[in-house]
Amino acid sequence: MTTPSPESARVDSWMWAVRLFKTRSQSASACRSGHVRVNGATAKASTAVAPGDEVRVRAAGVERIVVVVRPIAKRVGPPIAVECFQDNSPPPPSPETIAAIPRRDRGAGRPTKRERREMEKFRSG
C-alpha cells in the first residue's frame, strides 16, 4: 500500500474528515459495500482523491455528489470541512413527492401478484 502524497488523501479518510460519515469505519464500510464511486469507478477505501475528483456516495438512501476541493486526512470542524468540497447533489424530493410514493407497512410481507401488476402499471405510466 502506498501512502498518499500531501496533495491527495485516502477516500475513506477524506469522507470522514469532511463529515460525510460519522466514523471512519462507516466510511470504509461504504467503500467495501460499493456505495462509493470516484470519477465514475467503484472505489476501495485506499483509493486516493485529489482536487477536482468527483466522489459519489450513497448513504441512507440518498446519493451525495461532491467534488474534492482540498484533500484532508484529519477531521476538522464543520466550517472548515465545508470549504474542502463542493456539493453538487441534487435537491431532495419535495414532501408531496415523498408522500405520493406507495409504502408497505414494515413486515407486511412480499407483494402479491396483483399488487406487483399494479406497481408495474403505476411505474410505467
Image: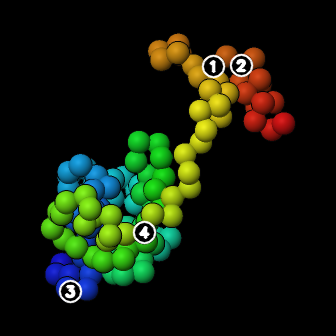
Image height check: is 119 above or below 22?
A: above
Sequence order check: which comes first, mark 4 or mark 1?
4
Residue 16 screen position, x and y as percent: 24, 59
Colour treatment of the image: rainbow
Q: Amino acid at mark 2?
A: Glu
Q: Amino acid at mark 3?
A: Ser
**Disc 1 target residue:** 111
Side (left or right) of 114 relative to 35? right
Q: Residues within 10 Å of mark 1 (few under 14, many from 20)?
A: few
- Residue 36's disc number: none
Sequence order check: which comes first, mark 3 or mark 2?
3
Tell me what residue is drawn at x 17 percent, y 63 percent. 75
Residue 36 versus residue 81: which sits nearer the camera?
Answer: 81
Q: From the image, state whether disc 3 or disc 2 is nearer to you.
A: 3
Q: Amino acid at mark 1?
A: Pro
Side (left or right) of 124 relative to 90? right
In three-dimensional space, the C-alpha distance between marks 3 and 1, rounded to whole angstroms, equals: 52 Å
Residue 31 versus residue 84: which sits nearer the camera?
Answer: 84
Image quarter (top left, top right, bottom left or bottom right) of the C terminus: top right
**Disc 3 target residue:** 5
The reply to whether the C-beta atoms of the residues labelled 1 and 2 are less than 8 Å apart is yes
Q: Secondary structure at mark 2?
A: helix
Residue 40 screen position, x and y as percent: 50, 70
- Residue 86's disc number: 4
In three-dimensional space, the C-alpha distance between marks 1 and 2, rounded to whole angstroms, equals: 6 Å
In three-dimensional space, the C-alpha distance between marks 3 and 2, rounded to whole angstroms, equals: 54 Å
Q: Amino acid at mark 4?
A: Gln
Sequence order check: which comes first, mark 3 or mark 1?
3
Q: Residues within 10 Å of mark 3 (few under 14, many from 20)?
A: few
Q: Secondary structure at mark 1?
A: loop
Q: Residue furthest right?
A: 125
Image quarter (top left, top right, bottom left or bottom right) of the N terminus: bottom left
